[in-house]
Amino acid sequence: MQPVQTADPARFQAALDLFDQHNAADPNVEMVDGHPRPRELLYAERLTSWVLQLAPDASEELRLAARCQHLCRWEIPRHTFPMTKPGYLQWRAKLKSFHAEKAGEILRTVGYPADTIHRVQNLNLKKNFPNDPESRILEDALCLVFLQYQFADLASKTADDKVINALQKSWKKMTPAAQQHALQLSYTDKEKALLHSALNA
């Protein structure tokens, strides 16, 4: 990870370590190069990587927000809310507040001041998006993680029209720079066709 400008490097590292320790407890795993990895720990690493690729000089708050964006996500499963569109939206809203609250607890534990905690939580909650430039970087990174690592799985088990709709929603939220990164990713022929349909509808 590129160096970050911070008055307290030890505190910053302690926060990252605690975020990672919590996410390492995820019972859900993904195989990477033949090895199982806790899903949310892997997600946090991938999101951090994209944030730093998009903004090598990313602030301490943005780096913290990237590392805890899906903190302990498995603790609130989708099936605990009605399996309807309103239920899905309720679940997503609950997750956002849950991640922000849990991140705040950890940041307080390692000694971050209230203003830093508030800033990280606002990024978690996507407050003032798209007017906040850092919220745009985080959203770009979220969309790029989806396209690089989750698009294929979605395309393999979801109706084409729903995949195209998801792609269009993601594309509209991305900056032109992130869109260029997305076009350079590797896709199967089916994924290329779906992306083409989404962008030329």
Image (cartoon, rainbow, N blue to C red):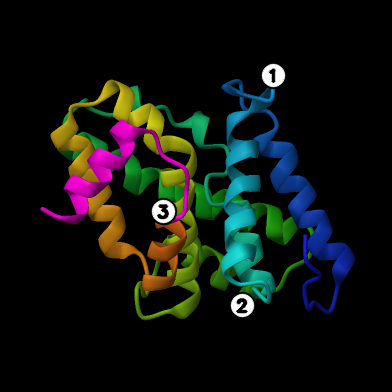
Between the C-alphas of marks 2 and 3, the distance is 27 Å
The residue lying at 30 percent from left, 54 percent from top is 170
- Give the vertical position of 40 relative to 3 (above or below): above
Q: Which mark is residue 123?
A: none
Q: Amino acid at mark 2?
A: Asp
Q: Which residues are magenta?
A: 184-201
Residue linked to disc 1: 34
In which image quadrant can residue 6 be found?
A: bottom right
How would you rate the neighbour count of disc 3 (Cα within 10 Å): few for under 14, some for 14-19, many for 20 or more?
Answer: many
Secondary structure at numbered mark 1: loop
Residue linked to disc 3: 143
Q: Horizontal placement of 114 versus 163: left or right?
A: right
In which image quadrant can residue 152 be found?
A: top left
Q: Amino acid at mark 1?
A: Gly
Where residue 86 sits: x, y (%)? 17, 39
In which image quadrant can residue 1 be found?
A: bottom right
The residue lying at 81 percent from left, 70 percent from top is 3
Between the C-alphas of marks 1 and 3, the distance is 25 Å
Where residue 33 sits: x, y (%)? 69, 25
Secondary structure at numbered mark 2: helix
Q: Horizontal placement of 73 versus 26: left or right?
A: left
Secondary structure at numbered mark 3: helix
Where residue 69 sits: x, y (%)? 53, 51
Q: Amino acid at mark 3?
A: Cys
Mark 1 vs mark 2: which is more N-terminal?
1
